[in-house]
Amino acid sequence: MSGKYGFSGGIDLPKTTPKPKPRPKVEGESLSEAVRAGADLGFVSREPSTRLKPGPKRKEPQDKVSIPGPKRVVNDFRAFCSARNLTLWQGLELLLSQEESRGR
């Protein structure tokens, strides 16, 4: 064997093909006509459907709260909820209802 990697005279690489030409732009009206025609023939969209979050059905509007704080306090709150088998929002609701019943 002689030369680098055992090829004495080098190797022949395949010829590259030219890049494909860009697609011509399609008018919006003709595209929407094509989509309607496809729908009439029973074609369905290949776009991914909206994925619902797993878990129980939501019965009221949802929102999020992000409250930075000392790790010890956050860990205590999580332990509080875990010990009572509550989600974090249920633990917050419980603490708020206890505060209301105290008259604050």
Image (tube, helix red, strand yellow):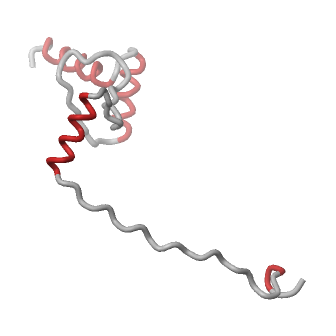
Quadrant that contains the N terminus: bottom right
Which of the 4 quarters of the picture holds residue 74?
Answer: top left
Placement of 5 over or under 28, stated as above or below: below
Farthest residue toward the right? 1
Q: Nearer the viewer, residue 26 or 84?
A: 26
Q: From what the image shows, is residue 34 above or below residue 89? A: below
31 lies above or below 15: above
Given residues 68 and 61, the one toward you in this image is 61
Name the spot of residue 95 as percent of width and height, x first.
23, 19
Above or below 74: residue 81: above
Who's the residue at 18% across and 42% down the image? Answer: 32
Name, please, the residue furthest toward the left: 103
User: Is 98 or 87 nearer to us in this picture?
Assistant: 87
Q: Residue at x 39, y 33 (%)?
A: 75
Quadrant location of the C terminus? top left
Tell me residue 92's x, y (percent): 25, 23
Which residue is painted at 32% across and 61% down in the image? 23
Left or right of 70? Residue 31 is: left
| Residue at the (55%, 75%) spot, across then down | 16
Q: Quadrant of residue 27?
A: bottom left
